[in-house]
Image (cartoon, grey):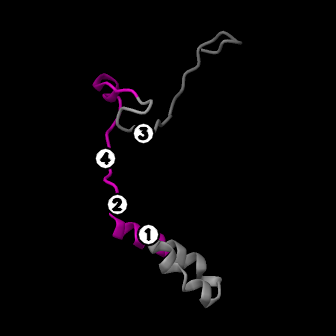
Amino acid sequence: WDRKKLFWSDVVDTILVAACGPPGGGRNVVTGRFFRFFNMLNISPPSQAVLKVIFSSILEGHLNDFPNDCKLLCKPSVDA
């Protein structure tokens, strides 16, 4: 509803992506009646080993153009 022009607007071909966490800290419980409109996808958090591989790969790629002294700091930086 457009309040200025006073006519109805239809929204088509729209994708809504939402995320939620467990209730608490200002978040309310979401009802099953509301969830029925969504497809649920649950992704487990990665392990520490997987996170180290991801971040070391990103940092090594970024440090390719730097001197070797900087490249040697990749593993200690990720392990910290």
Does residue 7 appear to the left or right of 23 in the view shown?
right
Identity of the residue furthest to the left in this view: 32
Residue at mark 4? 42
Name the kind of residue labelled 4 in the image: Asn
Q: Residues within 10 Å of mark 1 (few under 14, many from 20)?
A: few
**If you read the primary sequence from the N terminus, does the residue marked by circle 4 or circle 1 appear first?**
4
Spatial distance from mark 2 to mark 1, Cα to Cα? 10 Å
Q: Which residues are magenta?
A: 28-57
SS at badge 1: helix
Report if residue 30 lies within the magenta region: yes
The residue that appears at 43% across and 33% down in the rendered structure is 25
Q: Is residue 39 magenta?
A: yes
Q: Quadrant of the N terminus?
A: top right
Q: Is residue 36 above or below residue 62?
A: above
Mark 3 belongs to which amino acid? Answer: Ala
Q: Which residue corresponds to mark 3? A: 19
In terms of depth relative to the viewer, which is nearer, 30 or 37?
30
Q: CA distance from mark 4 to mark 1?
A: 20 Å
Image x and y of residue 44, in percent: 31, 53
How many neighbours does mark 3 have within 10 angstroms: few (below 14), some (14-19), or many (20 or more)? few
**What residue do we see at 64% from left, 88% from top?**
67
Per the model, the C-alpha gap separating discs 2 and 3 is 18 Å
Q: Amino acid at mark 2?
A: Pro
